Amino acid sequence: MVSRHLFGNIYGGFVMHFYCFVLLFLRLHLASGDVSYSVAEEMKRGSVIGNIAQDLGVGTRKLSSRNARIDTDGNEKRYCDIDSKTGDLVVVDRIDREGLCGKKASCVLKEELVLENPLELHRINIHVQDVNDNAPQFSEDFIAFEITESAVKGARFPLTQAHDADIGSNSVQRYVLQNNEHFNINVDIEGTGLKNCELILVKELDREQDKELKLLLTALDGGSPQRSGTAVIHVTVLDANDNAPVFSQAVYKSSLPENSPLATVVVTVTAADADEGPNGDITYNFDHASVEHGSLFTLDHKTGEIRVTGAIDYETETLIELRVRAKDGPGLTSYTTVIIDITDVNDNAPVISLKSLTNPIAENVSPGTEVGIINVQDRDSEKNRQVRCSIQPNVPFKLVPSIKNYYSLVSTAPLDRELVSEYNITIVATDEGSPPLSSSKTVHLSVADVNDNPPVFEEQSYSAYVTENNKPGSTLCSVTARDPDWRQNGTVIYSLLAAEVNGAPVSSYLSVNGDTGVIHTVRSFDYEHFRSFKVHVVARDNGSPPLSSNVSASVFVADVNDNSPQILYPSPEGNSFMTELVPKAAHGGSLVSKVIAVDADSGQNAWLSYHIVKSTDPGLFTIGLHSGEIRTQRDISESDSMKQNLIVAVKDNGQPSLSATCTMYLLISDNLAEVPELKDISYDENNSKLTFYLIIALVCVSTFFLTFIIIILGVRFCRRRKPRLLFDGAVAIPSAYLPPNYAEVDGTGTLRSAYNYDAYLTTGSRTSDFKFVSSYNDNTLPADQTLRKSPSDFAEAFGGCDESPEDLL
Ligand SMILES: *[C@@H]1O[C@H](CO)[C@@H](O)[C@H](O)[C@H]1NC(C)=O
Ligand SMILES: *[C@@H]1O[C@H](CO)[C@@H](O)[C@H](O)[C@H]1NC(C)=O
Ligand SMILES: *[C@@H]1O[C@H](CO)[C@@H](O)[C@H](O)[C@H]1NC(C)=O
């Protein structure tokens, strides 16, 4: 009843049950003499446990009179007391079952009711009944787990248990885990208690998905109302290297101009690793297969930056494929491909190569001849390899494009080695890159000789002057011919053209040095024999076939004063017959006689002058300086000696001059009766031989006369029949005897006017060498012609001198 009242308000349905339970105990205790009560813990103070007076059968009045009181067994705390008015046992202190008994299944408070007078002791057992007044409680709010993500399914992780001070069904009955996909909770039930509570992994963890999990774990007791406690399970997912690095691109493409400077960044590869820490630490490396390019590129192991470290050459490789490996700490790897497209830069100049060359090339090739073949290559591509080729304009060659990148070098004009013997043909090749590159090659081409030039004499004709009486072998002159051809084709050999001069082979007069062209005389020349002649010198080269040309060389023999004047009259021997009669009555200025002299030389050398060297009476006679005429200077007087002797010197005008002397005997008398004195005169001078000389003189005169007649006839005859003989002895005798046309010689030795020759014959002629020509006009030099070296002039002037002597006559 008390119980009912007590709990009625709070725990509705539970009250009835408890009431019956109490009644059961009361009857039991009554039977044994002790009193037992059952009471729920945590009852309010003053709550009635039972009416002990009634249960013991003791009247209420007795209770107070017998001084009833509750005594604790020992020193224990007093939880209940007796109400002496009603006899109710009431709660006086908080009864906490857990505090009193802990986990013991039955918790009994032992009290004693003491009655005095007489002393009566009744034991009171108060069974404290558990009430679900404690919720399950975890020892900590956070249960931390560190579970590696590599943990396999089914792995178990023990949990600490929740604690519930209550007992029995009021203690923890089950656990509820927050709904999640990874874990389940498993509780082993051993007897009444829960043991071995653990988390079971039902689905693998992935740190990369969830780094941590927070799961609410609820522990539930079995009380009514049910109480619960919670804890948060904090699962930290530990990283396992379960992720390989992943590149951001499967293939990296990059374009790189060749010759990029060092350290140019080509591309940066990046890989991500979902793992963390060392597991996500990525290092980049070139794959083994890309080692060959290791010298061209470097890969930053940390940043994945690929930089240029070598010479990138498009011409070597246009596309470079690199394999890059990313590796995390423990060694998971992945690969990517880097494709580097190298772009061309115009870095290769065209290369000109000479495939063939006809060198040397003969100078007589016709225009259009292919001389060489040239090939031009450019290693670049596209526009950068388009090449234009040219050669310099000032050579007679051109480039003719041929198949592909071949060109023919073709001559465009006739060649002449003698003008240009070699060509440096510069070929320039330029590509069309930007900027364009060009290169050049010089082809050296020599022109080979062909014997296409005959030797050419430096002069159109040569003239040589030699004074007579020259030494044989002396140098006369030299001829020179030039042949511009090469080597033997231009080597000149001189020779004399075979001919006859004056009936003798030309080689007996002159010789020419075949190498030098120096002409030597072979014999000594005599001006009095011939004055000039003409030869032809041939210059021939050594080619095959040889070419030649010839030139005429005229040789002029100059006079030397090598002949003394020849006195024709009077005889130089000085015969006394040669006496001139001078009439006594001769007046001053009368022509008495004449000295006749000739000189085989010519010009000044033959210009004679006459002088009286000695005379009997120096004042009586004079001699014409050039005429040789002896004239009286004054009238003859009686006192003059009858016999007059004159010694006359005849001098030519040569340097040095030569002279001859003669003696002229003059007899001043009117008749020959006085001739006998002549003997005396001569006897005076040449006494003993006079007679003898007279006889000889007579004989001589006769002989001379006869000879003269014969010669005259002979000359006439020979003029028609044998002209050649006459030339040999022909000597021009200046007509000293014929004053009107006597030649004068000017400073140059040119005969100024024509001079005539007449035939004279005197007793003084000793030889037949002297042939007197009537006219020498045609063969003398014209007055205005000097000895210039003008071949044509000479040819004209001496045109006939070597041809036929008869022209001289
Ligand atoms: C060609 O070149 C060579 C060498 O450079 C040089 O000796 C020669 O004189 C040149 N010839 C011409 C015709 O320029
Ligand atoms: C001379 O010319 C001929 C052709 O006329 C040629 O064959 C030869 O080679 C030339 N000689 C030299 C040394 O050039
Ligand atoms: C000499 O030269 C002339 C022309 O210059 C030529 O006609 C003649 O045949 C040549 N004589 C010889 C023997 O070569």
Image: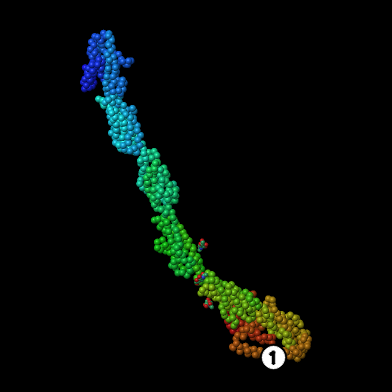
Task: From the top left corner, tell me how far across and down residue 65 is, in percent.
Answer: 26, 8
The image position of residue 289, as x and y in percent, is 40, 49
Q: Residue furthest front?
A: 32
Kind of residue indicated by mark 1:
Ser
Please tell me whether residue 419 is drawn above or below residue 262 in the rendered image. below
Give how far across and how far down residue 602 sits, in percent.
65, 79
Secondary element under disc 1, as helix, strand or loop, is helix
Residue that label 1 marks: 702
Task: Report x, y in % for residue 183.
Answer: 30, 35
Q: Is residue 247 above or below residue 7?
A: below
Considering the image in quadrants, where does the C terminus appear?
bottom right
Q: Is residue 457 left or right of residue 77?
A: right
- Lateral position of residue 589 relative to residue 144, left or right: right
Q: Is residue 169 above or below residue 264?
A: above
Q: Nearer the viewer, residue 373 or 340?
A: 340
Q: Is residue 483 visible?
A: no
Question: In the image, is 512 to the left or to the right of 141?
Answer: right
